Amino acid sequence: MEEYVGQLWDRLITRAAQTANEHAAVDLEQIAPSLGVYFRAFGGDPGLVIHASHPTTHGARRTWLQRVAGSGIKLALASVDADSLNLPQRIAVFPERELNRELYLWLAAFCAHSGATTPQSWLAHCQRTTMEILERFPGLKARYQRLVAAYLPLRPDPDTLSADESAQERTIRQALLCPGSVAALPGAHKPFHPVLLWPTPGADSPSVSVPRKQEDNGHEGRAAQNRDAPNLRRFRAEQTTEPEDKNGFLLMFRAESIFSWSEYARIHRSQDDEDDAEAARRAAQDTDKLTLSTGGATKAARVRFDLDLPATEEFVPLGEGIRLPEWDWKKKIMRPQYCRLQELIVPDVSPLNLSPALARTSRRLSRQFEALACERRWVGSQPDGEELDLESWVRHAADLASGHDAGADNFHRAMIRQQRDLSCLVLADLSLSTDAYVSNDAQAIDVIRDSLLVFGEALSKIRDSFAMYGFSSLRRNNVRFHHLKGFDEPYDGIARGRIAGIRPGYYTRMGAAIRHATTILERQRSSQRVLLLLTDGKPNDLDQYEGRWGIEDTRMALVEARRRGIRPFCVTIDCEANDYLPHMLGDREYVVIHKAQQLPARLPLLYAMMTR
């Protein structure tokens, strides 16, 4: 009975302290696609992706109901960092849904113009940015005024606050009503109630990233290696500080308040290699929100992580290695000879035939590809042919009438089979992330391997010139470029054997691999040259190549390829590719395959449509 009454009381107090208007809430996931276009249209960095910001403690005064209910301690605010635009996961501030949507749009426009700030200059910066936006885009003035008029009644009443807090609140209200009219915030050392129309002051961390200890240098790629597709799920996340180890024999709290696993989890858990890892994974699936913290022995975690990499096959290096540049997006300079790429080949490969299942798929696709191989086109101005060319006849008559030499009497059209003048290089991602399962019985590397086998069979039928390579990396001095089939080699059992023998390993330094592939393609004399990139995720590596660095370097490598007359195209099975591929490649130069099992059959058809 006591527990039942306590639950009723908790529900009553929590509901009374609730200030959100859930009936009019707008979720970030619903508005994110249009919000990204809106953000970039207002001049926002096109390389930023939109993430949900995690709630942070603001320290401002709360109402007595909130203090009783224990709510209102944290609040999710907007912020911008080097990699992402961070916005609240849900906005339910106003009772009208349209106003909540307009708040998202205003924050996106504000963040598109907002630069780095410090808490000391935060108020002046926000006012200055607001004035610049309203001056440059007068159409936003009415929206801003509506938001301010609806937002001010929701802020604390200055008459109910202490003298210092009241002065702060009146200053913020004045800055919102008349931007530029306030010089500084009085009592800046005291916490004030956050302003939802402005980004948080001094925010420079990603939405769900966790601060690293100083000794954890450059180890940013481990999260990308944990892509367990069947268990992949989005969680709401918040950040906390791990409590220091105290006397283990003294409990300073009631036993009922001990944190459960669902309330607190360390990122680098030392139990990851214990027998209960599967139970912990199941517990995570039943959790709505994960609280993340640093902790543990980062040096040991790093050593264990690197030792988890699979043993590689015996490869023979081709040459002494190639030095390649890399784009430093922060300094906006190209670092010459920054990476070392080594081309590798597996010796003594046994010839291999296609499996019966792949052979059936290959025969079906080959029949469809015969239309490309036997493509016939009408060619005008021929001395003889199947029918008259009226365009040539009119041009000939006009030349005669004007007194010019009409030339030969080529008045026919002929149906002529034309040879496809095209070279394609397929570059496959062979990183460790492809070891993840994409279905109950297939891994990503299996799908990529089957796709290469079927693709090779299809291209050999239409006799297009093509080559196949794979790549992986382990930091900048060990970019591995796997030779599967060269342009001057036939597609036979040996090539199939090399493809069947590929194994996942290491990381994804795309920029260096694309630059070397561009050099190989540039040697081909075809009129059309295509670089087909096959991957399952974004660029990453151990040495600062994770996140924005890898994306910007890959984007620059693709820009260089276009300048050299090569058309890049990406086929990916990464469901989150729409967050970064438009910036890297453009809207029409990539395709996302949502069902990875369909990749072997769809890849040749995509190629056919792209090169028709």
Image (cartoon, rainbow, N blue to C red):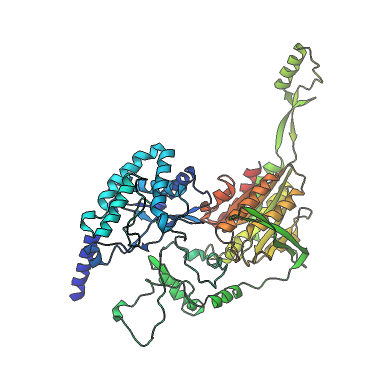
Against 417, is 271 above or below?
A: below
Image quadrant occupied by the C terminus: top right
Q: Can residue 376 be seen in this view?
A: yes
Near-viewer residue (364 or 152): 152
Q: Residue 96, percent across and down?
A: 29, 46
Q: Where is residue 324, by image quadrant?
A: bottom right
Against 75, is 250 above or below?
A: below
Q: Is residue 352 visible?
A: no
Apparent side of residue 612 relative to residue 195 in the rendered image (left or right): right
Q: What residue is at 41 percent from the left and 58 percent from the top?
A: 119
Q: Residue 442, percent across and down?
A: 56, 64
Q: Residue 91, percent across and down?
A: 34, 53
Near-viewer residue (536 or 351): 536
Q: Where is residue 404, by image quadrant?
A: top right
Apparent side of residue 273 relative to residue 526 in the rendered image (left or right): left
Q: What residue is at 42 percent from the left and 39 percent from the top?
A: 135
Q: Which residue occupies the extreme bottom position in the image?
A: 249
Q: What residue is at 39 percent from the left and 37 percent from the top?
A: 139
Apparent side of residue 171 relative to residue 500 in the rendered image (left or right): left
Q: Residue 60, percent across and down?
A: 30, 62
Near-viewer residue (412 or 395): 395
Image quadrant occupied by the N terminus: bottom left
Against 602, is 70 above or below?
A: below
Numbered-mark total:
0
